[in-house]
Image (tube, coloured by chain):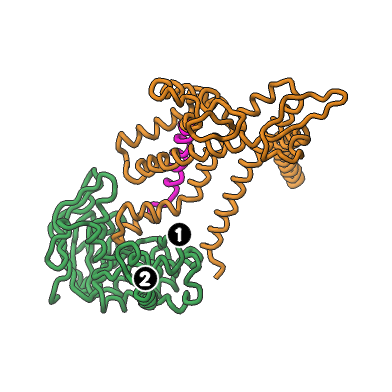
Amino acid sequence: MGARIRHGVNLTATVLAALTLVVVLIPLASILVTAFQRGEAALTSPGFFTESPANPCSPRAGTVCHYGGIAPALDGTLALVGLAALISVPIGLAAAIFVVEYGRDRPSARLITASADVLSGVPSIVAGLFIYTYMAANYPQIVFSALSGSLALSVLMIPIVTRTAEEALRTVPNSQREAAEALGITKWKATLRITLGAALPGIVTGVLLSVARAAGEAAPLLLTAFGNNLGFQGFTQPSDAIPLLVYDFATSPYQNWIALAWGAALTLIVIVLGLSILSRLVLARMARRLRGSA
Amino acid sequence: MDATKMAAVGLSASYGRGPAITDINLEFGPNSATAIIGPSGCGKSTFIRCLNRMHETAPRATVTGKVFLDGEDIYEQDPTAVRRRIGMVFQRPNPFATMTIFDNVAAALRFNGRHSREETDKIVYESLQAAALWEEVKDHLFAGATSLSGGQQQRLCIARALAAQPEVLLMDEPCSALDPISTAKVEDLIFTLKRTYTVIIVTHNMQQAARVADRTAFFYLGKLIEVNDTKEIFERPKEKLTEGYVSGRFG
């Protein structure tokens, strides 16, 4: 009797757990499928990744709508996020190293951690507004520029990189630091080449998380990168970005633009997903090599 | 004891609150092994960590007194320079997890100076030989260090310490995380190493102290109670406390 109840409970729990898996997977699958279906026409048009968007058009008898492509937005996003990563990864990493490796319980270290926490809660539009105001006051000629956009994205990325790198460094066992110290290896060498190496998987994950966050943000770019249909023209000029294109085109009444918006959205998802899968493969390979297949 | 390689003079240390060790005076001869025994919490690990200035890396740690190495106070020297002369092996094997076996042993050479490839290869080979690990790892030197068993990892850590070419080797309960077979191997190793190095080993295993050490020091509640030739400590202890501990009445 007891055994039968136990088996029954066990089975129910297993089924419930499996069901929650389905519940989690449904939104993901549904987003991918919807984006593909709605954007298919634009995605399969030949110049999707290489052309600028075509003129607005809704199909009428006797007309053929061209789609064009999302090249300016794609290039813009790569440039904006690339520069933002170049700015925020070194800053975030340095802050994390200071807090974990050198700060101990110093008030300055706790201040950095607390600031990063607060900063990561700041709404992204405020990050945009902050950079907009700063640039308008100091560099009025380039308020609307890729540089402003990257700075605004950096404001979002720095706290993510800082906090995740902090966590990653904290997971490195102290015995690794002691081992290095006891060999008479100087602190900075040990940090750069032993502690950072051991924390690398966590740091890479954090950087990717911040890249994914930045790549998907439209709000901070509205007031900074602004948008530009001509293609990327350098960091002092306004730049388009995929989320800006999605925002503009999805709310337009033109069918070809709406399709482009869906296609662009899917592209963004694939880039972020691809980056995360790629990093996992690389890290898994590194881990395998070190575990050694003797 | 005919000569002194290392000596603690009036050494006290704490972790911020009460003292962990108080006024320790202890000398270590060259080419010999000294065991430090005592019940848990008696300050033996704290003491040994003061000998290569690792104690002060703990939060709120304090040290007073002097530690002489070849007659010079290590507390008046650069701590990294001191640690290059005094190697340390920890309780739990702690090889660099992201490095290969070879790189672990070569770490001190690569980080602390310039050595040619041939020189590095030679020192890594000699260190692994000296740590009695070479035969077991020679065919997979470039596998990850964590692919080794616990006992092998500990001998790898010994090899890593030896590759730095220290004069003194501190061992903080090096066998406490190891199985009996690995323990026997590490003990054999200590027996060989003491011909070349000044070995100072903390252990809570009295048989181990009796097997490997020429001299034994007994610590209790942060104080040095008695130090003498190992045989004397175990067979004719002068202090009541020592006798109680080595005969297993407490600790």
Q: Is residue A132 visible?
A: yes
Position of A142 with respect to B189 (left or right) is: right
Residue drawn where x is 30% and y is 34% of the image? A107
Read off the magenta span: A153-174
- Residue identifier under label 2: B159
Q: Are marks 2 and 1 on the same chain?
A: yes
- Residue identifier under label 1: B97
Checking the image for residue A146, the label placed there is none
Q: Quadrant of the N terminus of chain B?
A: bottom left
State the orange chain. Answer: A
Which tag, 2 or 1, sits closer to the chain's start? 1
Q: Please tell me how crowded label 2 is: few (under 14), some (14-19), or many (20+) other residues with Cα within 10 Å.
A: many
Residue drawn where x is 43% and y is 21% of the image? A136
Rendering coords of residue A180 (x, y %): 34, 58
Rendering coords of residue B59 (x, y %): 28, 45
Q: Nearer the viewer, residue A53 or A115?
A: A53
State the green chain. Answer: B
Q: Nearer the viewer, residue B155 or A152?
A: A152
Position of B152 with respect to B172 (left or right) is: right
Q: Quadrant of residue B117?
A: bottom left
Q: Is residue B192 above or below residue A14?
A: below
Q: Is residue A50 magenta?
A: no
Q: Is residue B243 above or below residue A240?
A: below
